[in-house]
Amino acid sequence: MSIVLLTPGLSVIIDAIKLSRQIFLRMQSYCIYRVVETVRILFFVTIAILVYGSYPVTVVMLVLLALINDGSMVTIAYDNTRIPKQPQRWNLTFILSFATFLGLVGVIETFLLYYYTEIYLQLSHEMVQTLIYLHLAVGGMMTIYVTRVQGPFWSVSPAKTMLMATGLSVAISTILGWFGILMAPVGFWWTFASWGYAFVWFLIFDWLKLWLYRLLNKKKVVMLGQRYLRIWKQFSGD
């Protein structure tokens, strides 16, 4: 026997299921983002202290990162998401593995900047600290746009609320570093260079994310669009 449910009140249940799946994806993207940035900051600061015996950022800078960047992340609760067709469930092994890998890449990214400015160019230590702060602040906000979707970063447009909050966050951090508020000033050109460096790595992060999804689950590539599917099929010989 088959039962067909036609009661109008069932739309409420359908809406609840859709909303719950959206909330799940928002929570998952935030968890990935949080692990990535935690690994990046903790590992980088620890290595810099142990290897070079100096602090790459000040305590004030860490507090600013926590207040400005993490404060804007509250708006991820309003982010746009695609509604999955299948039920979702937590996969902590995947989340931790995926996020830790990206976080370690972030450590390399930040350490290259620190080595180039502190050791190679021998800029003043205070100026290097500001550049590192700028990179962590701007790069951290860019990271959320990588982790929020499983496809390319442009595949799902972000919510206006989150876009404005993250935009305000990086604007404040940029002004602090540029004019030297609570830190040493770096001026326009170094601020511009810091932005450019963060954007290049943002694109690298997005490519690595797609590669990881392909590596971990071939079926996930369908979510990246038909163009990406054809490219991966040609590459893998499927």
Image: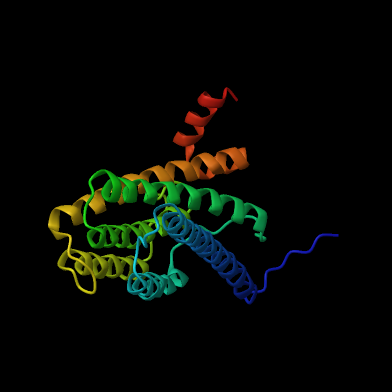
Count the labels in the image: 0
Q: Is residue 96 toward the left or the right of residue 73 in the image?
A: right
Q: Nearer the viewer, residue 196 or 154?
A: 196
Q: Nearer the viewer, residue 206 or 108?
A: 108
Place of residue 58 in the rendered image (x, y in percent of width and height, measured from the top left) = 34, 69
Residue 160 figure quarter: bottom left
Residue at 23% x, 74% y: name it. Answer: 182
Q: Quadrant of the N terminus?
A: bottom right
Q: Is residue 91 visible?
A: no
Residue at 17% x, 60% y: name it. Answer: 186
Residue at 35% x, 56% y: name it. Answer: 139
Looking at the image, residue 34 lies above or below residue 216: below
Place of residue 207 in the rendered image (x, y in percent of width and height, measured from the top left) = 43, 41
Q: Is residue 112 visible?
A: yes
Place of residue 190 in the rendered image (x, y in percent of width and height, measured from the top left) = 18, 53
Looking at the image, residue 116 lies above or below residue 135: above
Residue that protrudes farthest toward the right in the picture: 1
Q: How is the image coloured?
A: rainbow
Q: Nearer the viewer, residue 8 or 161?
A: 161
Place of residue 26 in the rendered image (x, y in percent of width and height, measured from the top left) = 51, 65
Q: Quadrant of the C terminus?
A: top right
